[in-house]
Amino acid sequence: MRYPALRAELREHYENKANDLAAAFRAHAEPLMDAAFEEGMSVYAQKALQYRVIAAECEPILFEHSPFYYELGTLAAHCDGARDFRGHSHAGGWVFRRNYHYFKELAPALYQQKKAQANELLYLICGVFNDFSQHFCFNHRPILEGGFRAVYERAERELARAQSDVEREYLRATMEGALAVKQMAEKFAKVAERYEKTAKSEEARARFARIAKSAARCPWNAPESFFEALNTYAFCRKALGTLEGVGFSSFGRPDKDLYPFYKRDIEAGTLTREEAEALVRQFLITFDMHYDHDMKMVGYADHELENTYTLGGCDDEGHPLYNDLTEIFLVAAREEKIIYPKIKARFGANSPKAYLDEINRAVIAGTSTVLYQNDDATIPAILRIGRPLAEARDYIISGCWDLTSVGVEKPDAGNYVNLLKPFEFSLHRREDKMAAVGLHFAPLDGAKDFDEVYRITLDNIRILFEERARITREGGHLWDKVDVLPLFSSTLADCIAKRRDFTAGGARYRDEHYYCFGLPNLTDSLLAIEQLCFCEKRCTLDEMLTAVRQNWQGCEDLRAEALRVPGWGDGDPRSSALAARLNSDLCRMLDGIRGGYGGKILLGHLTYTEIRFWGEQTLATPDGRYAGDYFAQGLTPSRLKKIPAVTSVINALSALDGAMMGGNSVVNIILPANRITLDRCEAFLRAAAGTALQSLQLNCTTREQLLDAQKHPEKYPDLIVRVCGFSAKFTALSPEWQEEVLTRNFYE
């Protein structure tokens, strides 16, 4: 690993200073905003005030060994911009916190019902009624093309056409936001001028001179060089997170968007490939040093920074995208042992071998930091929901698995829907829980055949889907009463043209993703009921239900029979057909439900650390799962089914229609490190590309290697595993999380 001085300087700041600086800035800035607040001030005027005060009061920080200007001293080290993040709150949440009471006061019954339903783990919303805190993707392209000056001028032109006070206030707040960004950058220029005079070396003096020159004009004006374009990513992440108070989770597609700057500089002779590589390495190191790779992962998201970029895939014409920058980012991330930003590597059956080899090198070496995203399943899923081909080809994966078309949407994506909860309430006759959440799920008792069991199960899931949609439909419109996001909206189509903030419906699309979890467990449970109760008649349905309600105690023989039944992922035609039927029925069900904003609700199969934490709070299921056992993650086969060959999983995935999963889906696969070569990994990916697999979380290791790492962690400093939506050093995982990884399926 290179750049030890830069690493040391950044480590000192983010481990020892950043959190205190952010807290101090909030303590300083919020009283100023409170003092300037006037009764009757609209939410747009409040946000404009927030922009002005933060920009005026922030004190930019430059690092002696860093070429970039970005750090404002306003956000905690782990914060992606979200106003309240892991116990840290920053000044950018002032407007939101001031108005939060409207959620409770304007919809009191809805607020309480949603809270009760969330407490019983029916679903998760990353917010009250909306995904309003994280999973935002700022569209950098208009800034790369025209700078914030162009944003300001577009808003100014629309202001002359505004028809209402709300439109005018939205546009004025947008202009205030652009000016705040300009002021922040100019502050960096002044700091750099001072540092240039006192720099300890010629190298540092040259860096500060470049920063002073660049910050005086960019990003108010469009970047003119590869350095300025790359720095725009860094600057916008911190500045917009600070000003808006929401988490920005992607740098977009750097090998597509930054390549014109790189190519122009190379051809002009103002940049060499080696210089570009150095900048990229330092850029990645900058954001990777925001946290300690060796801190213990114990809780829900201890190692999550929500920071990503997407590489590869295809260009606007559909040709594979693999250029110098793609390679530079991949090599830099591998050689510098970068975990953050997370790489989302798009691939397909026609991807170049050189590209597949490059994304595979780190993984087969035991550093699993890449999420593989299958274009051949993902693009058809985007087309199915009615998007044009250009938007389908131009998607990114942000956050953990959020499927987003660049610049045209911010899907409501922080939504998990627990398919196993209505199933559990039905199986175990949880009348108390159903009363608490205000929903009734019909029992399975007395079903005369499997078709009736299946119908009852689907009807119960429909009740959950419709209730979840109602929550956002009735409460989502309160968002723009509490907070607005003019700066975020400024580069999102078609907000300025409509003269309407994103929170008020200004974006081109307002779709929602329902990330369902439990489909593998549900498939296996239904198949166990069908096979044992109605086909083989090993037991009656009542006997099966009794065994499950007793957590299989005294019914070990029946549990063994349930485990013997084919299960999702084993390639058996019965399990594949049932999963395909269930997936199709869920998709069609959501097709018929109106989303909270009038848009579509898209099906996905994803699960974060709920595989453990929610599993611990879920009673036994007919697939042989004991109360408290893990859930399967996304479309990953249940660990109760010991499937030896990965080809069985691939065959099972071929049975699904990937186009039905417009919200994305994820599969975990562990391949044996002692048998995987670049050629074999390439062949595996090309085979997988022909299936419904979308997001692949691939680890290459063995159970023996992981067990040895438990005993001798000093021997495995760079053994990195994909946990769920993030990667972490295996030796940094708590014993509980190490056990979760060790109990997964290890395929031949």
Image (cartoon, grey):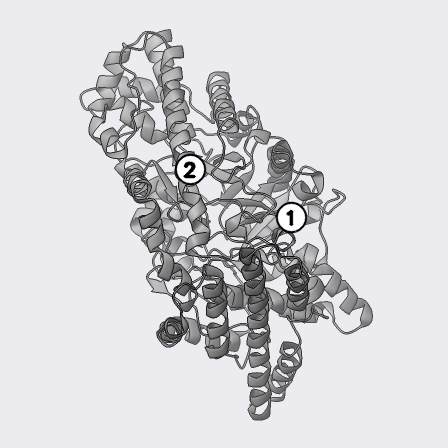
Residue drawn at x 28%, y 31% is 438
Q: Seen in the image, is 682 located left or right of residue 318?
A: left
Residue hosting label 1 = 357
Seen from this angle, which residue lies furthest left? 554
Count neighbours of disc 2 (C-alpha within 10 A) and say few if under 14, some if 14 to 19, many if 20 or more: many
User: What residue is drawn where x is 45% and y is 61%?
Assistant: 42
| Residue at disc 2, secondary structure | loop
Number of numbered tags placed on the structure image: 2
Q: Is residue 723 visible?
A: no
Q: Position of residue 569 (x, y in %)?
A: 47, 27
Element class at badge 1:
helix
Circles 1 and 2 in contact, beta carbons < 8 Å: no
Q: Quadrant of residue 227?
A: bottom right
Task: Say which amino acid is labelled 1.
Answer: Asp
The residue pinned by badge 2 equals: 633
Which residue is more in the foreground, 209 or 568? Answer: 209
Residue 524 in picture, x, y percent from top left: 39, 23
Q: Is residue 138 left or right of residue 583?
A: right
Expressed as whole percent of the image width and height from the top left, the position of residue 633 reads 42, 37
Q: Nearer the viewer, residue 605 or 311?
A: 605
The amino acid pointed to by label 2 is Gln
Is 351 above or below relative to 26? above
Local crowd size for mark 1, using a 10 Å CA cut-off: few (<14), some (14–19), many (≥20):
some
C-alpha distance separating marks 1 and 2: 27 Å
The reply to whether residue 461 is in sight is yes
